[in-house]
Amino acid sequence: MSVYLVVFVVLSYLLLIKCIYYWHRRLFMKSFKDVMNAGIRTLIVTAHPDDECMFFAPTIIRLVELKADVHLLCLSEGNYYNQGALRKQELLNSCAVLGIPDSRVTIKDHKQLPDDPKAEWSVSLVSSLILDHIRDHSFNMVLTFDGRGVSGHANHRAIHKAVRYRVNVRCCLLSLQTVGLFRKYISFLELPVSWLLPSSLSCVIGSQGYVRARAMFCHRSQLLWFRHLYVFFSRYMFINTFQTIPQGPKNLKIY
């Protein structure tokens, strides 16, 4: 009897996930219907090559499906192991799989913004680079990391700080929510939890989208054993939830 109960609970949970997924797709299309007529110009700001597919793949895929104009600004070449040129090409290959053409990918290589978890990036420099890019392309939506940076990387957190306290623009600023370790590694099974919790924007993909989300395999130089596990078990390969970035005081002295 207990076996039948377990099977019933599991099947019911999977059915719930499927229902939420299809409900979300309809709601996502409806919520963007008015914006689509005016045109969605989205900038995704990342710190390193592979951030785009490890963390933002569901969002990129859904926006590309909506024919949105999606751009990527990567603030370093990922030259921590002196592989900058290789990682730059891997990033372009990954973006092509996700649906972002080379012409919409900008990769910065600034000596004050090294790929180093111990390096403190200049918030003023990061904000100026982001602001210039926003003004040059007239984006109406900017997506980046939240204050915890999803993985806790110092470079990720610096981008959020720059956007929150220094980027003063008239567009929608959203940060990718960091979730706890358990939620992070239960894959698509996490969907009902994200559905119940409030968010400003959520993007969910199914099995077809997941095939494209595995653009991480374009980053062959980074495919250590634990990243293979990440691709299969991380909820960020299926689900992204965002919160609006509150605008902090612009006269705050942050360097």
Image: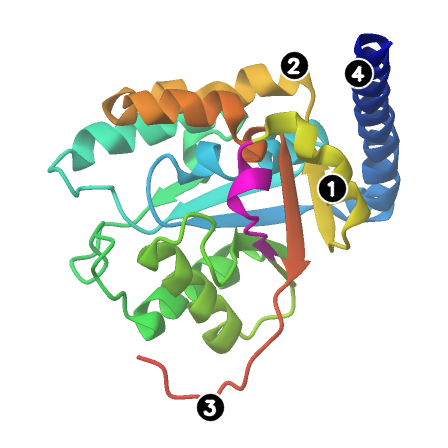
- Name the residue nearer the viewer: 81 or 180: 180
Identify the disc placed on residue 212. none
Identify the disc placed on residue 193. 1
- Name the residue nearer the viewer: 14 or 66: 14
The Cα–Cα distance between marks 4 and 3, rounded to whole angstroms, is 57 Å
Identify the disc placed on residue 6. 4
Let me know if residue 93 is in the magenta part: no
* Secondary-structure class at tag 4: helix
The Cα–Cα distance between marks 1 and 2, rounded to whole angstroms, is 22 Å
Q: Amino acid at mark 4?
A: Val
Mark 1 or 3: in front is: 1
Mark 4 or 3: in front is: 4
The Cα–Cα distance between marks 2 and 4, rounded to whole angstroms, is 28 Å
Q: Which residue is mark 3?
A: 251
| Residue 245 visible in the shown view | yes
Q: Amino acid at mark 3?
A: Asn
The residue lying at 36 percent from left, 26 percent from top is 227
Q: Are marks 1 and 3 in contact (CB under 8 Å)?
A: no
The residue lying at 27 percent from left, 27 percent from top is 222
Mark 2 or 4: in front is: 4
Q: Residue 180: percent from the left, percent from the top?
A: 55, 48
- Name the residue nearer the viewer: 37 or 235: 235
Q: Which residues are magenta?
A: 175-185
Q: Amino acid at mark 2?
A: Gln
